[in-house]
Image: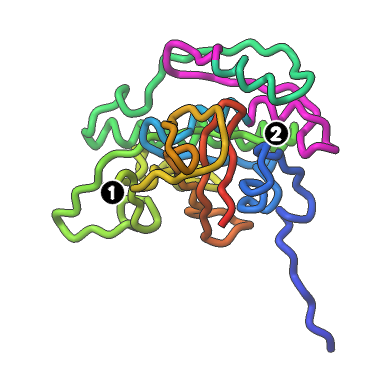
Amino acid sequence: MHPIKVENPLNLITQKCTLGCPILDHLLDGGVPCNSITELVAESGCGKTQLCLQLLLCAQLPASRGGLGAASFYIHSEFPFPLRRLRQLSLSFPHPTAMTPWTASLSMQSEFDNKPSDLKRRSSLFFGIAGKLKSIAKRFSLAIVVTNQVVDLIDSDGANGLQVGNFGYLYSSGRRVCPALGLSWANCINSRLFLSRCKEAGTIATSGSEDQSCGELGVMMMKRRMQVVFAPHLPESSCEFVIVREGVFGVGS
């Protein structure tokens, strides 16, 4: 009898889309997987939109460069669409195809009250939307990425992270937070990546930062962190990253 080594099927058969940075790709074991839903959760200003725009372009790269060699589609729920930033990022990626952004007005947080009947309807809507997205992702081998906001977590009754659906303590800008859409939505996605601001800025030898100030030793940049909260194919891990004119890039240790 010889022991059989069982590999995660997601690693064996699922194509992945590069994030456009080897450090971030290493964190995600190759990139964002197809056939599933990956969520980016963070407060405003942590890089959700920046990463989504970069993925929009990376998906169009050929497979030889880690892309999917396919068209990409962005549904943006807030006005205006960051078209200027998208054009700026496109200069870092050769031969991007034409894209048409679409906007949608539905906000899951504001469309429902906290009454039991509304919460039940919201949960049903979550499961319905997630089911459709997963079906489309598997049918066409798509990499689907969604975003989620956070709310401040006030732990007045001794509730722990599992009860509010954030699978552990999450901190951003020194505050304890949790994903805004709650536990029902957490059960609808396959993977969750948490983005947060680091408490201190770092000095990095680079140029073109979106949030930088010059200093004697280099460029002072706001560092952010990407953390794997849960994923079927990844361990809990994290890395720091910065946002520059050319894109979003991980910071090596």
Image quarter where the N terminus lies is bottom right
Classify 209 as above or below 3. Answer: above
What is the magenta segment's predominant secondary structure?
Answer: loop
Name which residue lies at 67% across and 31% down: 136
Is 36 contained in the magenta span?
no
Q: Tag 2, which secondary structure?
A: loop
Identity of the residue furthest to the bottom in this view: 1
- For the residues labelled 2 and 1, the Cα–Cα distance comes to 35 Å
**Residue at screen point 50% across, 19% down:** 76
- Residue at numbered disc 2: 142
Badge 1 local density, few (<14 within 10 Å), some, or many (20+)? Answer: few
Residue type beneath disc 2: Leu
Q: Nearer the viewer, mark 2 or mark 1?
A: 1
Q: Quadrant of residue 182?
A: top left
Q: Quadrant of residue 93?
A: top right
Q: Could you say where residue 12 lies in the image, as x and y percent from the top left?
A: 78, 55
Which is nearer the eye, 125 or 217? 217
Residue at point 60%, 30% (across, down): 247
Could you tell me the amino acid type at mark 1?
Answer: Gly
> Left of 129 or right of it: where is 62?
right
Q: How far across and down, in percent of the image, does residue 166 sit? A: 37, 51
Quarter that holds the C terminus? bottom right
- Which percent across, then down, holds residue 169? 34, 56
Residue in front for this viewpoint, 248 or 218: 218
Magenta range: 55-84
**Disc marking residue 174:** 1
Which residue is nearer to you in this view: 56 or 13? 56
